[in-house]
Amino acid sequence: MQDLIETASQTAGPYVHIGCTPNVAGIAMYGGDLGAVMRTGPVQGEEITIIGAVHDGMGAVLKDALVEIWQADAAGLFNTPHERRGKADPNFTGFGRSAGDMQSGEFTFHTVKPGRVPWPDGRLQAPHASLWIVARGINIGLQTRLYFEDEAEANAQDPILSRIEHRGRAQTLIARRTAPGLYRFDIHLQGPQETLFLDI
Amino acid sequence: MTQAPPRQGGFIARNRAAHPAALHPPYKTSILRSPRAALLAFPSSLSEETGPVFGQGLLGPLDADMITNFAAPGESAIGPRIIVHGRVLDETGRGVPGALVEVWQANAGGRYRHAKEGYLAPLDPNFGGCGRCLTDAEGFYEFRSIMPGPYPWPNGGNDWRPAHIHFSLFGPSFAQRLITQMYFEGDPLIPLCPILGGVTDPAALSRLIATLDMKATIPMDSRAFRFDMVLRGRRQSVFENRKEGL
């Protein structure tokens, strides 16, 4: 076994959309952008939309960020050949990528409410999605999680939410339900509302 | 007799000393975009250990050829022709098969095809500036492009980016997501770059620099550069206490 060191991260820079969402950047390529569609047919479970924005330390909304989402389907299964617990919903990819609206900076994911996924010891985690944020000025991609306001009971028992020392910061991981099927999740890179980022 | 594959444990903790710090003040944009609180560490679960997997069906025949993938029929991008190739490995030294590699870059004059880009160098009508490919069964990848130009950027009063190609990598796990930049051996702008200056470990910096590879160079056609990348790895231990299927 060789002992190698992970390649150093570098900022995605201001033109990440050329490489990752070229069609949004005005470059017609690949027959469409990767991760633009998460629901490829009729899906199991509740269809939801997640809308949010990424804010800098002065409260300004980033308009050059790229946000990715990875999550389980409604039954808690992942759509990957490495899933060994069952077969995930074939009409749900579990992966989304949003360049954000060029004017407002808001990112949007049309997804499903995820089911519960086990923790390594077998306990069930609360429903959540993993998010990854890159942009100009972000030297290493930021990992965080999105949980749901209307899952209070599961959230109270979640192995990650319950280990957050500063309890107020747990709230930064909770998406607000603003209408049936609609959730709002704001990411603050810095400042009093700084999002809890994960070292995984 | 065949051996069972080693059991995969959780992810090896990230060696953050080999990465730039979130806050690197000479790179001014990092000042307001860097978290100040400590990150929360925890054992990886299936949410981090799985990730989207992409197949060959995703790719078109020209995706990995930036010389022609945006060009008019019979045309090609302007600039020194290059091949960039290498291997994607994980921290345990094993090739990562099926990794999606997405690349983007400026044209030969140092200009990006982007609405917010205002550098006076001209666009090349036959160059889009993005490409992608999947690593093969052993983790090798290859694409073709033109040498990107260096360009000035608003940061200090007179900052220039060394010539570079941006790379986005997907391993099989979401915890492996990585974006980095590849630089070219011998570029005198490398030690002057405020972004690269965030990589304080000289060995980590040298691993971001592709080397001229004369063996892979195609005579009378294209120079080749070699660039290997390492994604995070997982522990391999029969003693790690994890429930079946996790």
Image: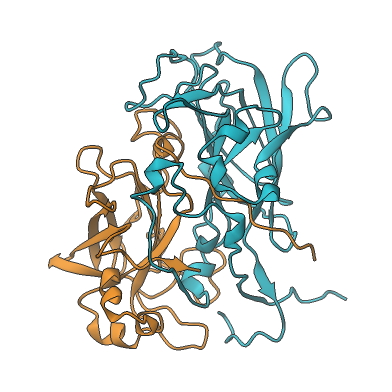
Which residue is drawn at the image coordinates 59% and 85% (left, top)? B242
Query: In this picture, is B190 found above or below A196?
Result: above
Colour in which chain B is drawn: cyan
Q: Where is residue B152 in the image (x, y as percent from the top left)?
A: 46, 24
Query: In this picture, is A118 found above or below A8?
Result: below
Which residue is drawn at the image coordinates 22% and 52% (left, top)? A59
Which residue is drawn at the image coordinates 25% and 87% (left, top)? A153
**Residue toward you, B195 or A75:** B195
Q: Position of residue B92 (x, y in %)?
A: 73, 64
Q: Position of residue A178 (x, y in %)?
A: 13, 65
Query: In this picture, is B66 found above or below B168?
Result: above
Residue B61 in view of the camera: no
**Residue toward you, A3 or B48:** A3
In the rendered view, does A4 fall on the left or right side of A28? right
Which residue is drawn at the image coordinates 56% and 64% (left, top)? A81
Residue A16, by quadrant, is top left
In the rendered view, does A127 fall on the left or right side of B94? left
Q: Quadrant of the N terminus of chain A?
A: bottom right
Residue A131 in view of the camera: yes
Q: Position of residue B246 (x, y in %)?
A: 55, 79
Q: Which chain, by letter, is orange?
A: A
Residue B64, by quadrant, is top right
In the rendered view, does A59 fall on the left or right side of A116? left
Residue B35, by quadrant, is bottom left
Total number of numbered discs in the rendering: 0
Residue most extreme to the right: B1
